[in-house]
C-alpha cells in the first residue's frame, strides 16, 4: 500500500479542511464559548489543559490531531494491514484471538494519545466535533477497515457519557478513554435485524433489583472485546411484554465477561473485525437512562453516530482503492506504454473511482 501521511498528502481532505468547512459555525456550536478552557484557567484541571481558548487554537488543535492520525494510519497501520488481514481472527471455545500485529497497532495509537478522539476531555478524551471524528475514521479506514472499526468501538464511550448515570460514567468512560475497556453495541438478533421494535431478548429485574438479560444477539462487532481487553456491550432488550413494541425496549450496559461468544462470522473482508454471536443467559445488566426509551432515544442516538462513522469508513476504503489504482496505472507498462495511456479501459478506471468519491 501507499505509505505517507494520509491527512497531509490527501488533497481532498486538505481542501475541505482549509477552504470548504465552516469551522466558525462548528467551533461556536461545539466548544460552547470555550467552556473547557475557562474551567482549566479557573481550577487547573489537567485533563483540560489542551482545551482551545479561541477559534484559531481550536482549528490548530483539530489539525494537529488529524496530522498525528494521518501519520500513524499512513505509515504504521497501512504497513501492517496486509499481514493483519492475511492472518485474520481465530475462534475457539468462546474466545477470539487477534493477530499480534493488530494488538501492537492499537497500542501504538494508544501511546500516541489520539485513541479517545470522540470522548469528552474531562473524562480523558480529546473531545473533537463529529466532523473531525469522521475525518479520523476516514484516515484509518484507508489504512485498514477492520482497524478503523476497532477504534470506533473504543469510542462508543461517547454514548455512555451522554446517557449514563454519573456513577456509570465515572466507572467506565475514563477506562475506555485509556484503552482499558472496549465497546460494543448489541441490537440485532437472529430473527430481528431491521425489525428492532419486535426483538425478543428480555430483561427482568430480580428480587434484589438487578436486571438479568436472556437471549441471543447476532452480528455484534467486538462483542468479545479485543485481545485481553474486555468490552462493555450496550444492549437493547425487552423490559415490557413480548408485544409491547418499541416502547417496551430498554438499554443496558453488559460486561463481556458475563456473556458467551458462540462464534464469529466468516466474512469476505474485514478479517480482523470480529462479528460475534453473543449469548445472554440470566446475564446481569445495568440500565442506561430510563426504562422504555432504549430504542427510540438511546439506540437511535448511538446509531446516528455509527452511521456517520460507517460513511467515513466507506470514504477511506474508496480513497485507498482510488489511490492504489492510480498508482498502478501510472507504473504498469504493457505493449511499451503505461496503463494510464493505454488501453483506454485501464486509463478510465481510476477516473471512474474519482467520480464516485466526488
Image: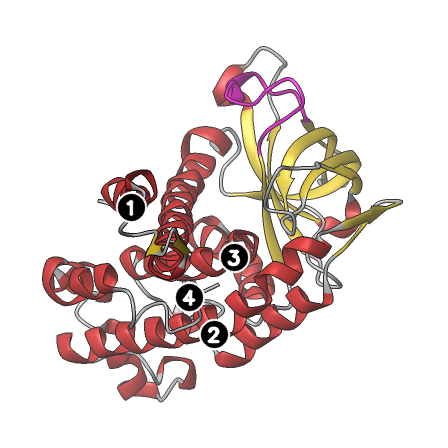
Q: Earlier in the sequence, mark 4 or mark 2?
A: 2
Q: Give the residue at x 33% y 56%.
A: 338
Label annotation for residue 347: 1
- Does 218 lie within the magenta span? no
Disc 1 versus disc 3: nearer the observer: 1
- The kind of secondary structure element at disc 4 is loop
Label annotation for residue 75: 2
Q: Total number of numbered labels?
A: 4
Q: Earlier in the sequence, mark 4 or mark 1?
A: 4
Image coordinates of residue 278 in percent, x first then y, are: 73, 37
Along the line of sight, which residue is nearer the eye, 146 or 84?
A: 84
Q: Indicate the quadrant containing the C terminus: top left, top right, bottom left or bottom right.
A: top left
Mark 3 sits on what residue?
144
| Magenta stretch, residue numbers | 187-201
Q: Earlier in the sequence, mark 2 or mark 3?
A: 2
**Crowding at mark 3 (Cα within 10 Å: few <14, some 14-19, many 20+):** many
Real-space Cα separation, disc 1 to disc 3, in angstroms? 26 Å
Amino acid at each position: 500500500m501507499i505509505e505517507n501521511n494520509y491527512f497531509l498528502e490527501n488533497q481532498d481532505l486538505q481542501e475541505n479542511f482549509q477552504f470548504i468547512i465552516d469551522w466558525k459555525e462548528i467551533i461556536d456550536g461545539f466548544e460552547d464559548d470555550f467552556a473547557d478552557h475557562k474551567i482549566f484557567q479557573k481550577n487547573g484541571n489537567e485533563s483540560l489543559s489542551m482545551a482551545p481558548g479561541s477559534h484559531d487554537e481550536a482549528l490548530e488543535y483539530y489539525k494537529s490531531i488529524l496530522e498525528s492520525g494521518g501519520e500513524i494510519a499512513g505509515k504504521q497501520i497501512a504497513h501492517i494491514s496486509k499481514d493483519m488481514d492475511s492472518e485474520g481472527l481465530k475462534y475457539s471455545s468462546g474466545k477470539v484471538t487477534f493477530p499480534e500485529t493488530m494488538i501492537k497497532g492499537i497500542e501504538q495509537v494508544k501511546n500516541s494519545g489520539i485513541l479517545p478522539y470522540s470522548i469528552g476531555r474531562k473524562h480523558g478524551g480529546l473531545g473533537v466535533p463529529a466532523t473531525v471524528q469522521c475525518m479520523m475514521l476516514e484516515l484509518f479506514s484507508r489504512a485498514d477497515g477492520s482497524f478503523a472499526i476497532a477504534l470506533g468501538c473504543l469510542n462508543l464511550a461517547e454514548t455512555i457519557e451522554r446517557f449514563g448515570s454519573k456513577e456509570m460514567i465515572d466507572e467506565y468512560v475514563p477506562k475506555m478513554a485509556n484503552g482499558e475497556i472496549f465497546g460494543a453495541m448489541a441490537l440485532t438478533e437472529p430473527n430481528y435485524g431491521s425489525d428492532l421494535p419486535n426483538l425478543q431478548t428480555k430483561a427482568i429485574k430480580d428480587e434484589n433489583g438487578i436486571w438479568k438479560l436472556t437471549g441471543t444477539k447476532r452480528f455484534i462487532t467486538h462483542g468479545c472485546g479485543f485481545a485481553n481487553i474486555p468490552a462493555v456491550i450496550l444492549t437493547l432488550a425487552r423490559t415490557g411484554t413480548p408485544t409491547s413494541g418499541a416502547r417496551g425496549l430498554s438499554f443496558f450496559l453488559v460486561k463481556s465477561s458475563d456473556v458467551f461468544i458462540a462464534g464469529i462470522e466468516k466474512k469476505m473482508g474485514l478479517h480482523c473485525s470480529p462479528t460475534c454471536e453473543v449469548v445472554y443467559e440470566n446475564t446481569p445488566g445495568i440500565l442506561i437512562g430510563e426504562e422504555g426509551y432504549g430504542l427510540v432515544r438511546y439506540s437511535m442516538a448511538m446509531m446516528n453516530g455509527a452511521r456517520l462513522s460507517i460513511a467515513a469508513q466507506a470514504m477511506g476504503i474508496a480513497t485507498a482503492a482510488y489511490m492504489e489504482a492510480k498508482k498502478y496505472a501510472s507504473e504498469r507498462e504493457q505493449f511499451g506504454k503505461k496503463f494510464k495511456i493505454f488501453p483506454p479501459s485501464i486509463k478510465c478506471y481510476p477516473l471512474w473511482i474519482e467520480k464516485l468519491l466526488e
